[in-house]
Image (tube, rainbow, N blue to C red):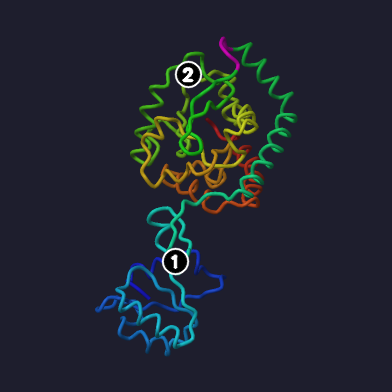
Amino acid sequence: MGPAEECRAAIESRCFAAGGEYRPIGFVDAHVSPAYDALGQIDDFPTVLQESGAEAVVVCGYLPDVRFREVVDAALTAECQLLSIPRAIEIAGVQPNLVWQQEQPLIALTAPTLKGWQLALKRLVDIGGALTGLLVALPLMLFIGIAIKLTSPGPLLFHQERVGRGGRRFRMIKFRTMRNGADDQYHKARAAAFIRMGTAPEGSREAGTFKIVNDPRVTGVGAVLRKCSLDELPQLWNVLCGDMSLVGPRPQLPYEFELYDQWQYERLNIKPGITGLWQVSGRNLLNHQRMCQLDIAYVREWSLLLDLKILAKTVPVVLSNSGRSS
């Protein structure tokens, strides 16, 4: 029950997807002149409710107070379950919670974030996973370090400022894959163009990560490391130090963060991760907006099981990606 466009969106949402507890049978349009696919308009609501045999009524969008009261009365009289779709999450990126003040009900709008016990559990998994990963990968990391030193002058590791939880900056560690002192202005300009356009500019691949094909700044060993994502192994130390998590949104570069739209700030409600939801959800086919949406979906829907699923999917995704030409 509500404006036609709001009702159609509700019917197509995950709440009422096939196989769930609810099966939509139609909608009543709040407009006086109902949409062509509506079961009727608001004055017809009690009649439609009886004839349809509906067991639940979902109020969508905005209704004037008088009309809302009429809908509630009719639904409760018909002994239907009455539901209302909160608009706060979609519009402002916050979660609604009912609270009482002086016997007066209020809707508290809070940013979706992990609770204390969830943060503690996630941190325990991060520490255990990072320690295990560092111990298992140590021989490989020593070999990579030797290869970098023998083939390219400069430091073994590359430190880069990234934006973490709450917008705080931290130094992310990677194996150096470029020539020492390589200029990042070219990448900065093209990354900005990509974010504004939403699709990868010519000469780049991996829409979500914006990697430049045949980048002349990358060394021979660095190209192999990037292809296999082995350059990211030192980030396990970032996880151990608490700057990053094993799973989370992609850590943004400061000049990428400066181009954020307001709705994208929700990505900062949790620590960035080495891997994440968008990396295992078709990383080569995603545009920038879709990548951000998946990061936000991860923040809102976090669970330990989701983390474990993403970690389990990461290895085959990296292996299949490493088999592609760069």
Residue at 30% of width from left, 77% of height from top?
A: 36
User: Which span is picked out in magenta?
Assistant: 152-156
Which is in the foreground here, disc 1 or disc 2?
1
Quarter of the rendering containing residue 136: top right
Inspect the image, locate mark 2, and give the three-letter code of the amino acid beneath it. Answer: Arg
Question: Is 56 drawn above or below residue 232 in the view shown?
Answer: below
Say which element carries label 2: loop
Q: How many marks?
A: 2
> Counting other residues with Cα less than 10 Å from the Cα at mark 2, is it few (<14), some (14-19), or many (20 or more)?
some
- Is 235 part of what is drawn in magenta? no
Q: Nearer the viewer, residue 255 or 212?
A: 255
Instruction: Tell me if residue 78 comes above or below residue 241 in the rendering.
Output: below
Mark closest to the chain's N terminus, 1 or 2 = 1
Is 131 above or below relative to 266?
Answer: above
Above or below 76: residue 24: above
- What residue sits 63% from the left and 47% below the top? 307
Q: Which mark is residue 200?
A: none
Provide residue 269's location: percent of width, then percent of height: 50, 44
Task: State the image coordinates of residue 283 (x, y, percent, origin top left).
Answer: 51, 42
- To which residue does mark 1 refer? 102
Q: Are marks 1 and 2 in contact (CB under 8 Å)?
A: no
Query: Principal SS element in the magenta part?
Result: loop
- Quarter containing the N terminus: bottom left
Decide: few, some or many residues near mark 1? Use Cα within 10 Å; few <14, some 14-19, many ≥20. Answer: few
* Residue named by callout 2: 217
Residue 141 location (% of width, % of height): 68, 23
Question: Looking at the image, which residue sits at the far left?
Answer: 33
Q: Is residue 33 left or right of residue 162?
A: left
Type of amino acid under label 1: Gln
In the foreground, 117 or 90: 117
Across and down, in percent, residue 113 comes to 52, 49
CA–CA distance in space, label 1 to label 2: 64 Å
